[in-house]
Structures are given as structure tokens and as C-alpha cells.
Amino acid sequence: MSFQENRIALVPEAVELLVNNGHTVVVETQAGQKAGFSDVQFSEAGAHIVYHTEQVYEADIILKVAPLTSDELQHVRMHQVIFSLHLPAMQIEYLEQLIEKRATGIAYEYIKDESGRFPMVRALSEIAGSAAILIGAEYLSNVNNGKGILLGGIAGVPPARVIILGAGVVGEYATRTALGLGAEVRVFDNNTYKLMRLQNNVNVRVYTSIINPARLREQLATADLVVGAIHSELGRTPCIVSEEMVMRMKPGSVIVDVSIDQGGCFETSHVTDHRNPTFKKHDIIHYCVPNIASRVAYSASIALSNVLVPILQRTYDFGGFDNLLQNSAGARNGVYLYKGCLTNRHLSERFNLKYTNLELLMTATF
């Protein structure tokens, strides 16, 4: 499994809804076990439980959280439709095999809703922001060889200082959780509108600042926990915390780099996984797991299902996936590969592969 992925794309309640509305759903045995869902629950919801991977790939649409493994790619059929996460982590070998099979690939995180927002990103970002603070609190404790600091403090004992880099959805929910636990919170972002929105949404006048290197360096030196929640629309997250800044932080402090799935916003970050989630550099604990939401797989799986069910139901209503794409600009936005043609400009530039505009391609096809 990629980074020990524990989530599943559809929970039993979602399967029941789809089956009752005309879909046939196939679930690989024990697929939902790590998220807390048994084969019996899926079976009672109307799913067909299969015991061999190749049986799953007889379906027209494949739903998986992480990208397919090399073994799973061998089972992909011609013109199959594949939904998955983690487009930034995709490798050229993966793309080439899907192109060869003339598959259609959809990235959950690029699907838009009717209001033009990214519902999957929103849901998983809310989880990641909340979880980042809870993770940081764990690693500040003596149990995990931390400094023995209680995040919220108590009467007569000052709270921990939490610095959050980024005022988007992850930053907002990290702020909510940290404030809820009683921590002192400071938020940095170069977008003043996002800072104002965050303050309005959390309804607390927290300390906010643009990302001025001198001020950031000064504040990082006083932090107990730093959460990296910078998101980039262009692919790679800007590295805003230099190694020299990390070296000035207090020994035993904790960094949780939620931005690591886009490369990370700390110069000292590198990807870890759930088996070995942390490392120490310059005596600072770094937590850099890309799929934080997999720590709370039950909740995250429900969030995934909530976004996917309406899309899948509309596929049935429109009479097929191609017809859905014709009628849904939001679904089209998630397509990075259409019947073997690369339709995502960022992937095209990254791997130097031919790019085809999806709108023009679908016009020619229909």
C-alpha cells in the first residue's frame, strides 16, 4: 500500500445508496477493514465481495484512494475509468501504463462542485488541519520523547505557542483545533484576504502576519509547534522556512509539514510514512507523512464517500461516464487522462509528454 493507505473510497452506507439506485458495486475482500468496515457490512449493503484482484478490474469504473500499485496496473482493461488521489506524487511509469491501456484517469482532488470549489480537497484539508494539531500535541509529550509540554497549559502554566504557516482550509482547521485546546496561535500567510477570512471564521482575533522572513525567523525561535499548511496552485509548495530558521528553533520543538505532499514548505523536510512518521534534524522533531487523513481512516472514508456518491449517481443518470463529462464541467476538471490522451497541462510539462485539451478532444470524440 502507498504510505500504508487505510482509507476506502466508498463506505457501506454509500454502497447501499448506489445499489438502490441501479449501480452494481464490487468490493475486494477486506478492502475496508483498516477503515473499520467489514465484508459483512458491505455485503449487507448490496456489494458483491470478490476474493481476487482481477475480479475487481472487470468493473467499468475503479475507485481507489491511492494510485494503483504496479501489480494492480497489470489488471487494468482497455478504456477503463480510474479514480484516485495524489496526482502530485504520480510517476511517469504510472502514466505511461495507463496511456498504453487508453484509460481515463480522474484525480479526486481536482474535481469541482457546482459552485466551482474542490469538495474533496476541502474535506480532506479539514481533517488534515485538525489532525496536525493533535499529532503535534502527541509529539510534544514525554511519551514520544518530546519536551513534556501540555498544548493548552493550565492555571499558572503558560500554553504552548503554535505557529501555523498558511491560512487556507488546513490552516483554518489547525487554528480552530489549537485554539480549542487552549494553545497560543500565530498564523502567517502572504494573502491578507485569507488571514481576514480565517479570523472571521474562527471568530477570534488571533495574531496574524504576512510571511516576512525576519519576523518569521523571530517567531519560529519561540515556537513549540509549527504546522506547515502552505498550498500551491502550481504544483511545488514554496519553501518558506530555511534550514537556518529551523536551526534557531527551540530543541525538542515539533514541525508537522502538511504541505509535504507538494514537496514541503520546510527546507529540512522529507517524506516519511506511518510506520516511521518522524525524524529529528537539528534536534527538531519533523512529522512529514503525506496522507495524514489516513490516520483517521473511518472519518476520512466517510468524507470521500460524501463527495463521490453524487458523482457516481449522476454517471448513472446521464447514461455513462462520457455523458457525465459532457454535462459536468466539475467532473471534467478532475480528468488528467482521457482514453489514453494526457489532458493535464502540469503533468504534460513535468514529464514532457504531449498535452491535449480535453474540451477539444471530447468535441472531436462526440
Image (spheres, grey):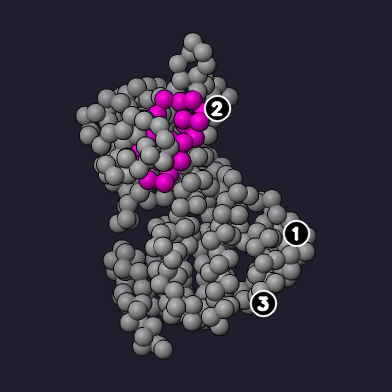
Residue 350 at least partly seen: yes
For disc 3, the marked residue is 22
- Quadrant showing the N terminus: bottom right
Q: Magenta part of the protein: which range? A: 163-185
- Circle 2: element type: helix
Q: Are marks 3 and 1 in contact (CB under 8 Å)?
A: no
For disc 2, the marked residue is 144
**Label of residue 41 in the image:** 1
User: Label 3 to label 2, Cα distance in Å?
Assistant: 50 Å
- Circle 3: element type: loop
Question: Measuring 50% from the left and 23% from the top, which residue is drawn there?
Answer: 152
Q: Looking at the image, which residue sits at the far top?
A: 156
Tell me the crowding category of disc 2: few under 14, some 14 to 19, or many 20 or more residues within 10 angstroms, Cα based: few
Question: Nearer the viewer's eye, disc 3 or disc 2?
Answer: 3
Residue 54 at least partly seen: no
Question: Measuring 57% from the left and 51% from the top, which residue is drawn there?
Answer: 300
- The front one of 241 and 150 is 150
Q: Is residue 334 above or below residue 216?
A: below
Question: Measuring 74% from the left and 56% from the top, which residue is drawn there?
Answer: 38
Q: Are marks 3 and 2 in contact (CB under 8 Å)?
A: no
Q: Position of residue 291 (x, y in %)?
A: 50, 49
**Residue type, mark 3 in image:** Gly
**Residue type, mark 1 in image:** Gln
**Residue type, mark 2 in image:** Asn
**Label of residue 74 in the image:** none
Question: Measuring 55% from the left and 64% from the top, which residue is drawn there?
Answer: 308
- Label 3 vs 1, first from the N-terminus: 3
- Label 3 vs 2, first from the N-terminus: 3
